[in-house]
Image: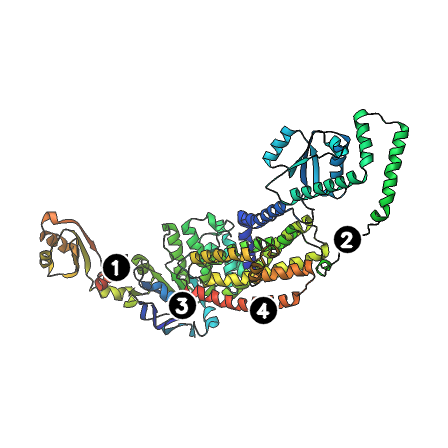
């Protein structure tokens, strides 16, 4: 037969499972928030967003095609996708905001380039974006600079190509002479070009040697699990008031051991519920964000303990209130700032420094940061955090036991 | 078994209990009779240890409920006014919970579960969730949960409020059985009929004070065996003189209450003293606790 405290825990668990919608909301609201935020910001290590460059090639020449193809080569291709469209379609897409920029290559671009005449490329940038359009503009400026150098270095050869372009008539001898000329020109500059006499070397700073960057979603999901726990705390604490109003606690306190066993049973029930919630959400988040398996125990145990700390503290608030209504108002009013500033709605890494510092003074913020630092930043102060957690749990346990007796004594039910 | 010694309790400016003393012996039912707000529930809360009185003490089998709570509470059972039940659990599961709360376990608990279910007439509905019960059935289960551990002293705080006649009968029979088994029962109520039926002794409480105490027969004697006559109609101050030869308990523009021995014989003569259009209702009530309460306080038990 179960002990009285185990029976109390079982009754509480049954009542929680009976309230399916409550349980459902504790689990799904944080999941939805994390996935939304992750989707908006690009998630974990899924790579940066890719922009779209619309190209209207009114010239449609070898040179214009060479330019367009070069924009979709190498590392640029990971940032920019090219889409060839006509003017009308391009205007529609830009109006809808579905592209980062629109490049128009004017007619006679090739002829003007080859004959070293002034020519123009026109670029329309999407005003709603900043990074990708600027990247496209910078890339095009590089190409226009490069084109300018090519014009200077290979002016004669380009004129020959221009003539061929117009007449479509180049003999074998003329082709060989052109190739030799280009090769000789390149040989003159080869010593300066390969390797470059001026080398740009990237210097690694100390910060660069630290842990690899962590995606927004991965930073956020421990806080989202804490959110689920805090939502559940509000409901679980109010169930004690329900038992008080129903007279259960009144009769229990008239028995020699009932209230103590009830209190212990509530703690057991909360631990079981937290363990279930943390385990479920950690598995889901860990799989989605590819958290290494060796980090799961730390995450799970850390969150359960942190949640239990928050339970003890918020329970004190609930038990201090004189009525059920005031307890409900106060605990819900307390939870939202705790969530906002303590790294549940936004990871503290995304907050301004001064706000993040304030967040660390909230217990959930402090413990969440301790967990994340141990997981991602290799700063491990878990021992200190654990000791603090143990002290808080111990002190508030005693306080809450006394508050419960006081509340039952004061209740007029 | 139960001793209340000069307890007083004040909440703010209101003295809820004022120097109340009584005792309840084993095998005795003591009724605490009074209107709402008289101090009955506060007295129960003091006796059960929920409230600490400002003065005086409460003893259960010689042990103070406040300084020796564990020793005192092992003798105590409580049936509160609220339904202290888990609604989602079955009757049997509720009894298991409360039995364990009172220290029962194993076979002893199972036997007591069955015994109290039969005693309150819920043995055939034992497995159903309490949510499905009527109000009267919940009251019966509430009572069963308070007696599952066979307490030597039982506190019942208005156990029949809102109960159907069948359930009330079950409960009153069960309480009488407890008395026969030697349990000391403190029974608070504002129903005079229950007090007169069940109680060996009654304390009438009003505004925190016990204003009369004794057996039902002794209390009736305080009425000098006079009946209560109630006249309802339209009266003015001059009409009071028409009944000045009787003991007038209460006089108001709409009602006159007076005491008279053998009231039935006097009624027609009394009515003749008033003009016919003045009185639209007249009643006679034999001497009982309610009439005593009215005599002592000028108010009804249900005020």
Label 2 vs label 1, nearer the camera: 2
Mark 1 lies on residue: B290
Q: Is residue A254 visible?
A: no
Measuring from the top left, give residue B94's x and y in whole percent: 50, 56
Mark 3 lies on residue: B51
- In space, the residues marked 2 and 4 are separated at their CA atoms by 55 Å
Label 1 vs label 4, nearer the camera: 4
Q: Is residue B189 left or right of residue A2?
A: left
Residue nearer the viewer, A90 or A11: A90
Q: Are marks 3 and 4 in contact (CB under 8 Å)?
A: no
Q: Classify 10 Å Cα crowding around label 1: few (below 14), some (14-19), many (20 and above).
A: many
- In space, the residues marked 1 and 3 are separated at their CA atoms by 29 Å
Mark 4 lies on residue: A391
Identify the image quadrant of the N terminus of chain A: bottom right
- In space, the residues marked 1 and 4 are separated at their CA atoms by 60 Å
Q: Chain of mark 3?
A: B
In the rendered image, which quarter is residue B171 located in?
A: bottom left
Label 3 vs label 4, nearer the camera: 4
Measuring from the top left, give residue A90's x and y in whole percent: 64, 32
Element type where label 2 sits in the image? loop
- In space, the residues marked 2 and 1 are separated at their CA atoms by 106 Å
Mark 2 lies on residue: A200
Q: Chain of mark 2?
A: A
Measuring from the top left, give residue B73's x and y in whole percent: 46, 69
Q: Which mark is residue B261?
A: none
Q: Classify 10 Å Cα crowding around label 2: few (below 14), some (14-19), many (20 and above).
A: few
The residue sitting at 66% across, 43% down in the picture is: A132
Q: Chain of mark 4?
A: A
- In space, the residues marked 2 and 3 are separated at their CA atoms by 83 Å
The residue sitting at 65% across, 65% down in the picture is: A382
């Amino acid at each position: 037969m179960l002990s009285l405290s185990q029976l109390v825990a079982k009754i509480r668990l049954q009542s929680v499972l009976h309230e399916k919608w409550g349980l459902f909301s504790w689990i799904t609201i944080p999941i939805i928030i994390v996935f939304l935020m992750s989707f908006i910001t690009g998630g974990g290590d899924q790579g940066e967003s890719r922009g779209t460059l619309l190209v209207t090639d009114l010239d449609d020449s070898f040179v214009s095609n060479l330019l367009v193809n070069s924009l979709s080569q190498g590392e640029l291709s990971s940032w920019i996708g090219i889409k060839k469209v006509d003017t009308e379609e391009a205007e529609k897409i830009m109006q809808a905001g579905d592209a980062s920029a629109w490049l128009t290559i004017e007619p006679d671009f090739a002829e003007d380039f080859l004959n070293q005449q002034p020519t123009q490329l026109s670029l329309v940038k999407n005003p709603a974006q900043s990074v990708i359009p600027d990247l496209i503009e910078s890339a095009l400026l590089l190409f226009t600079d490069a084109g300018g150098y090519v014009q200077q270095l290979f002016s004669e050869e380009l004129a020959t190509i221009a003539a061929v372009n117009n007449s479509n008539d180049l003999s074998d001898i003329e082709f060989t002479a052109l190739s030799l000329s280009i090769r000789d020109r390149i040989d003159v500059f080869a010593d300066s070009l390969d390797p470059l006499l001026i080398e740009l070397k990237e210097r690694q700073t100390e910060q660069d040697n630290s842990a690899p960057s962590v995606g927004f979603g991965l930073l956020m999901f421990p806080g989202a699990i804490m959110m689920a726990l805090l939502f559940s705390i509000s409901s679980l604490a109010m169930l004690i008031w329900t038992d008080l109003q129903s007279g259960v606690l009144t009769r229990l306190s008239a028995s020699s051991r009932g209230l103590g066993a009830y209190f212990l049973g509530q703690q057991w029930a909360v631990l079981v519920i937290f363990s279930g919630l943390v385990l479920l959400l950690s598995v889901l988040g860990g799989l989605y964000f590819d958290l290494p398996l060796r980090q799961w125990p730390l995450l799970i145990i850390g969150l359960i303990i942190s949640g239990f700390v928050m339970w003890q503290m918020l329970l004190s608030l609930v038990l201090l209130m004189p009525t059920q209504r005031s307890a409900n108002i106060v605990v819900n009013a307390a939870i939202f700032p705790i969530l906002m500033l303590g790294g549940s709605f936004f990871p503290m890494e995304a907050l301004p420094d001064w706000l993040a510092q304030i967040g660390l003074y909230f217990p959930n913020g402090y413990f969440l940061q301790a967990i994340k630092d141990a997981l991602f930043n290799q700063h491990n102060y878990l021992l200190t955090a654990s000791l603090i957690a143990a002290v808080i749990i111990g002190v508030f346990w005693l306080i809450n036991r006394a508050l419960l007796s006081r509340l039952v004594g004061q209740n007029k039910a | 078994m139960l001793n209340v010694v000069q307890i007083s309790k004040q909440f703010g400016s209101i003295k809820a209990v004022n120097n109340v003393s009584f005792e309840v012996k084993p095998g005795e039912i003591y009724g605490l009779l009074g209107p709402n707000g008289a101090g009955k529930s506060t007295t129960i809360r003091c006796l059960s240890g929920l409230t600490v009185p400002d003065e005086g003490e409460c003893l259960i089998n010689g042990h103070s409920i406040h300084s020796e709570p564990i020793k005192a509470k092992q003798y105590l059972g409580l049936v509160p006014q609220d339904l202290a039940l888990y609604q989602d659990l079955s009757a049997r599961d509720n009894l298991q919970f409360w039995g364990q709360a009172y220290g029962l376990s194993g076979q002893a608990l199972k036997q007591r579960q069955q015994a109290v279910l039969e005693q309150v007439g819920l043995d055939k509905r034992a497995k159903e969730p309490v949510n499905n019960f009527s109000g009267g059935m919940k009251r019966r289960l509430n009572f069963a949960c308070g007696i599952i551990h066979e307490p030597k002293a039982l506190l019942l705080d208005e156990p029949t409020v809102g109960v159907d006649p069948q359930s009330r009968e079950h409960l009153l029979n069960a309480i009488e059985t407890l008395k026969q088994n030697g349990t000391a029962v403190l029974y608070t109520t504002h129903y005079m009929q229950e007090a007169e039926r069940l109680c060996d002794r009654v304390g009438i409480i009003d505004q925190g004070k016990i204003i009369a105490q004794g057996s039902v027969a002794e209390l009736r004697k305080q009425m000098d065996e006079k009946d209560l006559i109630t006249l309802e109609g339209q009266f003015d101050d001059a009409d009071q003189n028409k009944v000045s030869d009787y003991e007038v308990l209460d006089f108001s523009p709409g009602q006159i209450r007076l005491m008279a021995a053998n009231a039935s014989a006097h009624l027609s003569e009394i009515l003749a003293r008033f003009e016919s259009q003045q009185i639209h209702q007249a009643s006679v009530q034999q001497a009982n606790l309610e009439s005593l309460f009215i005599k002592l306080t000028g108010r009804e038990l249900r005020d």
